[in-house]
Every structure is written in C-alpha cells, then in structure tokens.
Image: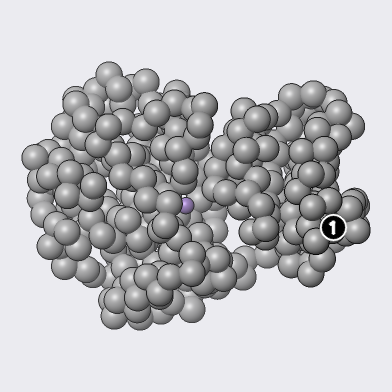
Amino acid sequence: MIDKVIGAIQDAQTILLTTHRQCDGDGLGSELGMYHALKKIGKTVRILNVDGTPSKYDFLEPDKHIQYFDGSYDPIQDSDLALIFDTNDKRLVEPLYQQIETHCKKIVFVDHHPILKEGPRPTSDSIINVSAASTGELAYDIIMGLNIELDQPIACALYTSLVFDTQLFRYVRNSHRSHEVAAHLLKYEKQPAKIHQALFGNFTAAKLRFMAQALSRIEFYFDDQLAILLITSKELKEMGLKIDDSRDLIDMIMNIETVEAAAMFRQDNETDFKLSLRSKGQFPVTAIAESLGGGGHPFASGASVKGSYPDLREKVKSAMAKHLELISAS
Ligand SMILES: [Mn+2]
C-alpha cells in the first residue's frame, strides 16, 4: 500500500498537501512534516487547508507554511498529486476538495480512520491504516520510504502528530510502534517538553472557568456509565473563547472511572449541534455517529446533527442503552 504512495510521490513534481477542516495536531503535523520532507527532495509543494489553524499550534509556524482556502491563498495551479491527511472522507475537505479534483491529477488520502460504511469511498491509491495510532506515523513511513533524512522541522511536526493523537501516549493502539517512531523523531527534536506544553498546557484562566461551568452541568445515566454534556457556542463566545477551547472537555469527562461512554453536544444555533462521542473501548461508537451522518474512530467519533436538544439527547441515550445495559448485566 505504502509503496504505491511512495511511487506516486516519486512520479510527481508539483504536490498539494491538505487535511480535514477544523484541523488538529495530527493532520497539521503530518502535512507539515511531509512539506518539509518533500522540499528536501526538490518537489514543488504547498499546503492549502480548508480553514484556519488554532493558535496553540503557533510553534509549528503554520502561517509561514500554510495558506487557507477560507482566507487568502495563491491561485491553485494544476498539480500532479494531492495528499490529504488524517481523513478519508472528502466531505471534510469541502469546498476545497472540488478544486483539488479539478486541478490535481491524482488524489491520495493518507489516514488511520476506518472507511465509513455509507460514506464516500477514498480514492483507489489511498493508504488507510487503522492500526496506526496517528496519521503522523504513516507520514513517517512514507518519508522513510522515500529515504529522506529527518531533521528538526520534520521531527517536530511528526512528533506533534503523534503526541496529539495519542494524548501523550495514553491512546496507543497496544503496539510498541508509536514509541519507536517517537524515539527516532526525538533524535532530531531536542525539546519535546516544549511541544507537550504547547499542546496540553495551554489553558487560560477563562478557559478553565468555562470548563468548570460546563462540567458542573454533566448529566449521568446508566449507573454513571454514560455522561452527556451540552455546551453552546454562545457561551464560548461570551467568555472570549474559541471553538477549539471546548475540545478538551469530553476527554476530561472520560477520566471519570465509572464512565464507559460520553456524548458532548455543542449547540451552534437553535437546531444545529456538533456531537462528539467517546467510548473507553467496551463498544465502538462509530455506528452511532454514522447513523447520525457522521463518522470517526471506533472510540472517538462525531457528527453534525440537527434537531431539538431533548430529542437528540434521547437518540444518543437509547443508542448507548443496549451496550451499557449489557455491561451492567455482566
Ligand atoms: Mn488522527
């Protein structure tokens, strides 16, 4: 699989790199690592993302290397290849994806999310490896396969991918692979603690106040095995925070010992919600997300949903019920 992508890169001169909208550390690190690597072997390479980069990634100097489709960007030239990182669902790259289809001869997704049962199919040359704990590990394999020597900017970007998606090696996929890749990267990136701090030690007092307020509203069901939380974009805005500031909340809820699964709704207006779902691993939540028009990883998925909050909450509760009642009974 990986040989095909390596071949596609070797055959290409002009290469466009991107990731899913509302980018995160994994997609960003993968595309930036690849950007620095491909420049070293003389490729004409650019990164064009759907939307902006959250400020906690400033240490990666995104504004030096990345242009934004929802902002200002140089015209999209015809290119030999597009590499899309950390998703295999083209809908998450729209409206940029249509431009990529028009201008790029070949499109390859490099990803570690399962392919949705009822979503769009990834292009035929894509690498989808669900056993990788981060897309950064796949980018690493490609860079190694191209015999490109690592350096600090490549290592910093790929290490960011890896520690972001594994949450500092908490969610490794029961393999020594993530640690091995990290150990190699750290021969070139000498200040990993700075990256840890930027990614995970970036709370502001306002963010913590928001989190305290939100966490006080968690509702528990099924003997405290399911936690459901509603937050609103409005309260984030009123407290001077960004959407990205609410992302840690659901992971924090998952630290509760009794909780097997959690759902967080972010209300964007009267009837539009962004739903995030997590499971500790007793059962996957992708099917629930997919039934609501979303997708993701088996134990971390999401969907954009429409409706009234009480109805949506009931839907999630009843979809979770059969799994959680089984666990209670056993
Ligand atoms: Mn990822």
Q: Residue at x 49, y 64 (%)?
A: 173
In front: 220, or 272?
A: 220
Q: Quadrant of residue 308?
A: top right
Q: Position of residue 293 (x, y in %)?
A: 62, 28
Q: From the viewer's perspective, is 175 left or right of 7?
A: right
Q: Is residue 239 visible in the rendered structure shown here?
A: no
Name which residue lies at 41% across and 79% down: 191
Position of residue 327 measured from the top left corner of the image (x, y, whole percent): 78, 57
Q: Quadrant of the C terminus?
A: bottom right
Residue drawn 44% across the image and 41% down it: 87
Amino acid type indicated by mark 1: Ala
Q: Residues within 10 Å of mark 1 (few under 14, many from 20)?
A: few
Residue on which disc 1 sits = 329
| 297 sits to left or right of 248 | left
Q: Give the structural element (helix, strand or loop) at label 1.
A: helix
Q: Position of residue 2 (x, y in %)?
A: 23, 50
As drawn, 263 above or below 94: below
Instruction: Say whether residue 291 is visible.
Output: yes
Residue 82 location, quadrant: top left
Vertical order, 132 against 31 (above or below): below
Q: Nearer the viewer, residue 125 or 241?
A: 125
User: In the rendered view, does 68 fall on the left or right side of 83?
Assistant: right
